[in-house]
């Protein structure tokens, strides 16, 4: 038998089928997710005039805290649904530039034991509960096998700045039955994301496992719902009107008609969570000023502000991010209400002057 030389041991994983049966979707939940995907698609294609807002913690590290955030988000979403469509960030895998905690699926106990079978179970159970509560979920798929376990529960997928140039992740996005956003590269490069959108829209075939865990090849037809996410660079931002226009022209050059999403976190806040608010207001003002090519905004938002350093020897605060710093809930709620209120006023003004 051929073995991987550096592997110390192996552990069995449940098959996708086993987890599906443990945490199934009923017909109403399936219909809700299908409709959520369609709504996101319509917003980013300009068929729905609302603004898409993807918001939530940088990563999920505590199930109870995630459910508390979801409960608040659900109420907020109902209050602003006439102007905004809110989708919760449920990021269960985290890319690392060097080393660090890789997310709930990879290390659910936060202690380096990497009990991935447990992580997959916890992830699917959480997502199933959120679907039952009618909360649309967004994530970033990193391992090509992950969507086979939880992809039916996800309404929107992101391809991040570290993986946007990866052929594997472009091909994976092409097979997904949901809209996918592609972030510009870590240093602000737009062409990587544009290339990814084009690649995603074309058919690909990738090896993986099927529902029963058997090795197989997936043949896809391409995903036409790819769009650009502006997330800034290591030492620069690109949420301002001039940067947005540069992006719009670049998309036009390649005949890409989908709208743009602006991520107010990451490079666009230079890792200072409080600066997300200014970026959000700037983007909102562009929308109010008539910029129709902005379809979505992203916020990293959690129950309490900031971030804590992950330490396997300490008990982590469930309400504070252990990856990127996040905006607190009160500030997030205030921003969303402000956006809905000003969009309503703008809509009334346009109706009166038309």
Image (tube, rainbow, N blue to C red):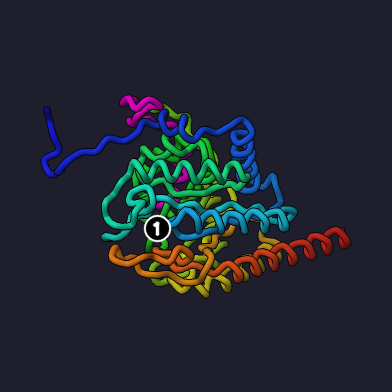
Q: Residue at x 44, y 57 (%)?
A: 62
Say above or below: 249 vs 6.
Answer: below
- Residue 54 drawn above or below residue 216: below
Q: Is residue 209 magenta?
A: yes
State the residue in front, 212 or 349.
Answer: 212
Say left or right for 32 vs 236: right
Question: Foreground residue, 152 or 272?
Answer: 152
Provide the residue span drawn in magenta.
Answer: 192-216
Please tell me which residue is depicted at 70% across the width and 47% down the height of the picture: 48
Q: Quadrant of residue 42?
A: top right
Q: Position of residue 300 (x, y in %)?
A: 51, 63
Tag 1, which secondary structure?
A: loop
Q: Report the residue at 48% width, 71% height from top.
A: 269
Q: Is residue 257 left or right of residue 59?
A: right
Q: Residue at x 29, y 57 (%)?
A: 111
Q: What residue does disc 1 label?
A: 185
- Horizontal side, residue 40 vs residue 266: left or right: right
| Residue 291 visible in this rendered orientation of the protein | yes
Question: Residue 184, how many percent across, how many down?
Answer: 44, 57
**Mark 1 Cα shell of 10 Å, populated few (<14), some (14-19), many (≥20):** many
Residue 141 spot, x, y in % from top left: 41, 45
Question: Dividing the image into 4 quarters, which one contains the C terminus?
Answer: bottom right
- Asked if residue 126 is among those painted magenta in the image, a careful observer would answer no
Q: Nearer the viewer, residue 268 or 21?
A: 21
In this picture, is 257 found above or below 185? above
């Amino acid at each position: 038998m051929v073995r991987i030389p550096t592997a110390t041991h192996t552990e069995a994983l449940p098959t996708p089928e086993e987890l599906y049966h443990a945490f199934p979707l009923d017909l109403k939940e399936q219909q809700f997710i299908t409709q959520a995907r369609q709504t996101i698609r319509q917003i980013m294609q300009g068929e729905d005039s609302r603004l898409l807002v993807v918001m939530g913690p940088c990563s999920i590290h505590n199930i109870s805290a995630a459910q508390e955030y979801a409960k608040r988000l659900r109420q907020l979403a109902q209050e602003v649904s006439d102007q905004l469509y809110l989708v919760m960030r449920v990021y269960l895998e985290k890319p690392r530039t060097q080393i660090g905690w890789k997310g709930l699926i990879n290390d659910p106990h936060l202690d380096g034991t990497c009990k991935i079978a447990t992580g997959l179970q916890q992830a699917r159970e959480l997502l199933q509960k959120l679907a039952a509560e009618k909360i649309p979920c967004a994530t970033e798929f990193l391992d090509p096998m992950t969507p086979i376990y939880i992809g039916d529960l996800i309404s929107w997928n992101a391809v991040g700045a570290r993986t946007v140039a990866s052929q594997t992740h472009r091909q994976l996005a092409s097979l997904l039955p949901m809209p996918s956003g592609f972030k510009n590269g870590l240093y602000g490069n737009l062409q990587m994301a544009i290339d990814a959108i084009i690649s995603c829209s074309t058919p690909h075939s990738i090896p993986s496992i099927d529902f029963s865990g058997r090795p197989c090849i997936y043949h896809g037809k391409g995903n036409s719902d790819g769009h650009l996410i502006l997330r800034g660079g290591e030492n620069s931002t690109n949420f301002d009107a001039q940067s947005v226009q540069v992006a719009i022209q670049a998309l036009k050059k390649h005949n890409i008609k989908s709208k743009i999403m602006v991520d107010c976190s990451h490079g666009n806040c230079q890792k200072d969570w409080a600066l997300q608010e200014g970026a959000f207001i700037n983007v909102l003002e562009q929308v109010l000023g008539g910029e129709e090519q902005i379809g979505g905004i992203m916020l990293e938002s959690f129950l309490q502000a900031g971030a804590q350093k992950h330490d396997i020897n300490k008990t982590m605060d469930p309400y504070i991010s252990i990856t990127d710093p996040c905006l607190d809930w009160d500030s997030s709620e205030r921003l969303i209400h402000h956006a809905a209120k000003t969009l309503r006023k703008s809509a009334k003004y346009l109706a009166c002057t038309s």
